[in-house]
């Protein structure tokens, strides 16, 4: 412990000197504690941990670490804890958009780069269920490939994009079109190993150390670093029948979405949706689904309506059941009231279906459009107020250029565990509305500029406030503690008590600005 304190004191001095513009020699003491494969002080490593996918904030850490074990993580946190006010943030794939995984002048623990040595995780069958134990920095894409490769198993609940770390999505919730049925990813975790803010490695679940388990799920990295997660698995389907239909009537669209997520027997496995205000979008980004040979002309179906709503559904199946899927899909579609000429169906493997956003990423990277600023806004909107939201935002504030896809889909609150730290509206059904925007700094179109998109985000939030629409931000970002208190509402006191118990010096997760490190 004495060595750790000595190391961090010197690191703190380096940090102070760096803040006044003096470069210092690498913090040798940390390098004595953890070899240079684990602790990195070189400028490229620091630069890589200074920003994120959003590219809206930068803040340089003093050091980055690539731990190889939970014990490495524990040693690093114990060092920071001993030094008092040294911020530490876990970083998964760095796909946050508002600096949530940054550690200004602190230590970034790069979980996704610190992959464990040794054999890949393999699924286990015990206690009547299948599960797999993975490292907190593993990506969901890797988890899928390992579990499929061992007995054709897969996690049940996903995000749309799989190149996100397990620890990163579990710190938020992890939602996609399966959440209405299986709940978010945080509802599909059986056990965790967490290194707390005092550097203690704790195994937790709903049965053991349940307060820490629930604190960490949706806990925005505030209570500990997840080093191991036990993920529930199911037999993986082999194929997905993927269907998109269009609506011009918002009430019919949401009625059908809510009807689909309420079904118990025969149902779709995935239900999402998109808001389309500009024709360009329909053959863009995630909409590659609409084949160029069969483009949808928004004008031809929209009539007087400027806004269209796309309901997106998938039915999974096994090859041997292929004959039954047509009938099931037909029976389900028969209940819906979409514009009849707008049904588009495709059939692909389950892996291709789950990889759909990654393929879009590759296309955007090819055009230099991936590494641009992303002023994303993700909101949970209560179902009873989604029509007001539509009138004010989709058919109002948005205008005719969204700067990227706008997702909209409902979820059932009874699939979420109220004991977790995740925050959702106080209604049985609520919608995710995700404005997934990309700013184009060199565009001549002012509606593509970062400033314009940020201003629209502000207008959307102000509109909700004025219209008393009780939204909650998903992947939240706030500037003041007062805003965080409002965000957590009745959960705030418990959040604070959990912080005091598991990270008493407030060293973890300072990128969010909820708490500030104290000695
Ligand atoms: P990071 O950005 O690295 O970290 C996010 C937060 O988690 C930080 O607070 C960090 O400190 C904390 N953290 C990271 N690792 C750990 C750990 N091991 N232990 C404790 N805390 C940790 N989200 C959805 O729910 N559904 C989607 O469909 C979806 N699609 C997306 C698509 C794209 C293209 C992108 C860029 C993001 C998407 N997201 C989606 C958002 C994503 O889930 C979050 O941004 C998530 O935090 C990203 O994971 P990450 O590994 O990049 O985390």
Image (cartoon, grey):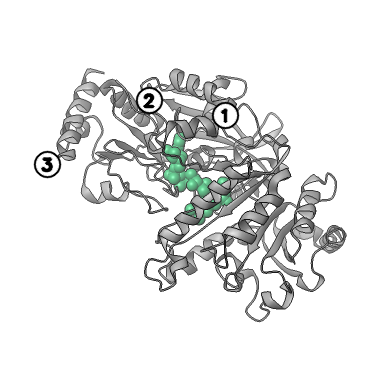
Residue 322: percent from left, percent from top: 80, 62
Q: Earlier in the sequence, mark 3 or mark 1?
A: 3
Pick the front one: 507 or 318: 507
* Residue 247 occupies quadrant: bottom right
Check the picture and name the quadrant holding the N terminus: top left
Q: Earlier in the sequence, mark 2 or mark 3?
A: 3
Residue pictured at 26% horizontal, 23% vertical: 83
Badge 1 residue CB within 8 Å of ligand 1 = no
Q: Which residue is mark 1?
A: 489
Q: Tell me if residue 90 can be seen.
A: yes
> How many callouts does the rendering have?
3
Q: Position of residue 265 (x, y in %)?
A: 85, 46
What's the distance in space between the residues labelled 2 and 3, CA to CA?
A: 27 Å
Point 69% across, 62% down: residue: 309
Q: Few, some or many C-alpha atoms within 10 Å of disc 3 (few <14, some 14-19, many ≥20)?
A: few
Q: Secondary structure at mark 1?
A: helix
What residue did someone put label 2 on?
A: 506
Pointer 2 with pointer 3, Cβ within 8 A: no
Q: Nearer the viewer, residue 235 or 241?
A: 241
- Labels 1 and 2: the sequence-earlier one: 1
Position in image of residue 157 (x %, y %): 64, 45
Marks 1/2: CA–CA distance: 20 Å
Residue 22 numbered mark, or none: 3
Specify the label residue 174 is tagged with.
none
Q: Secondary structure at mark 2?
A: loop
| Residue 475 pos. (x, y %) | 51, 43
What residue is shown at x 52% (from left), y 60% (from top)?
358
């Amino acid at each position: 412990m004495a060595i750790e304190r000595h190391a961090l004191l010197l690191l703190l001095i380096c940090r102070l000197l760096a803040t006044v513009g003096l470069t210092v020699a690498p913090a040798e003491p940390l390098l004595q504690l953890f070899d240079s494969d684990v602790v990195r002080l070189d400028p490229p490593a620091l630069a890589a941990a200074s920003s994120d996918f959003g590219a809206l904030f930068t803040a340089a850490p003093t050091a980055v670490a690539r731990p190889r074990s939970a014990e490495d993580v524990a040693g690093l946190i114990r060092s920071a804890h001993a030094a008092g006010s040294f911020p530490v943030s876990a970083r998964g794939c760095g796909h946050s958009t508002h600096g949530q995984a940054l550690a200004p002048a602190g230590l970034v623990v790069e979980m996704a780069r610190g992959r464990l040595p040794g054999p890949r995780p393999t699924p286990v069958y015990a206690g009547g269920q299948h599960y797999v134990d993975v490292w907190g920095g593993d990506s969901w894409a890797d988890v899928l490939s390992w579990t499929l490769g061992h007995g054709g198993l897969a996690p049940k609940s996903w995000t749309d994009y799989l190149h996100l770390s397990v620890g990163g999505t579990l710190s938020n919730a992890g939602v996609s079109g399966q959440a209405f049925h299986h709940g978010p990813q945080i509802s599909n975790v059986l056990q965790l190993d967490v290194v707390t803010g005092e550097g203690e490695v704790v195994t937790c679940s709903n049965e053991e150390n349940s307060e820490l388990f629930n604190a960490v799920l949706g806990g925005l990295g505030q209570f500990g670093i997840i080093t191991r997660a036990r993920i529930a698995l199911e037999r993986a389907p082999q194929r997905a029948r993927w269907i998109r239909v269009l609506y011009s009537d918002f009430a019919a669209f949401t009625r059908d979405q809510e009807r689909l997520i309420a079904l118990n027997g025969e149902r779709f496995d995935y239900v999402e949706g998109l808001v389309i205000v500009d024709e360009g979008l329909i053959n863009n980004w995630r909409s590659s689904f609409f084949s160029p040979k069969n483009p949808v002309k928004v004008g031809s179906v929209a009539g007087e309506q400027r806004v269209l709503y796309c309901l997106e559904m998938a039915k999974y199946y096994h090859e041997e059941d292929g004959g039954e899927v047509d009938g099931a899909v037909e029976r389900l579609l028969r209940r819906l009231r979409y514009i009849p000429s707008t049904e588009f169906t495709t059939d692909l493997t389950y892996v291709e279906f789950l990889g759909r956003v990654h393929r879009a990423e590759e296309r955007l990277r090819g055009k230099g459009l991936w590494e641009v600023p992303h002023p994303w806004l993700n909101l949970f909107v209560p179902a009873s107020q989604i029509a007001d939201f539509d009138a004010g935002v989709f058919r109002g504030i948005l205008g005719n250029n969204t700067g990227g896809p706008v997702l909209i889909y409902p979820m059932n609150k009874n699939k979420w565990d109220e004991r977790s730290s995740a925050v959702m509206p106080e209604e049985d059904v609520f919608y995710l509305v995700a404005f997934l925007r990309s700013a184009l700094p060199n565009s001549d179109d002012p509606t593509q500029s970062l400033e314009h998109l940020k201003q629209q985000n502000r207008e959307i939030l102000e509109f909700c406030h004025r219209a008393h629409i009780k939204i909650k931000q998903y992947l939240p970002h706030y500037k003041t503690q007062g805003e965080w208190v409002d965000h957590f509402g009745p959960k705030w006191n418990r959040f604070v008590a959990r912080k005091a118990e598991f990270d008493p010096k407030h060293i973890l997760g300072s990128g969010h600005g909820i708490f500030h490190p104290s000695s």
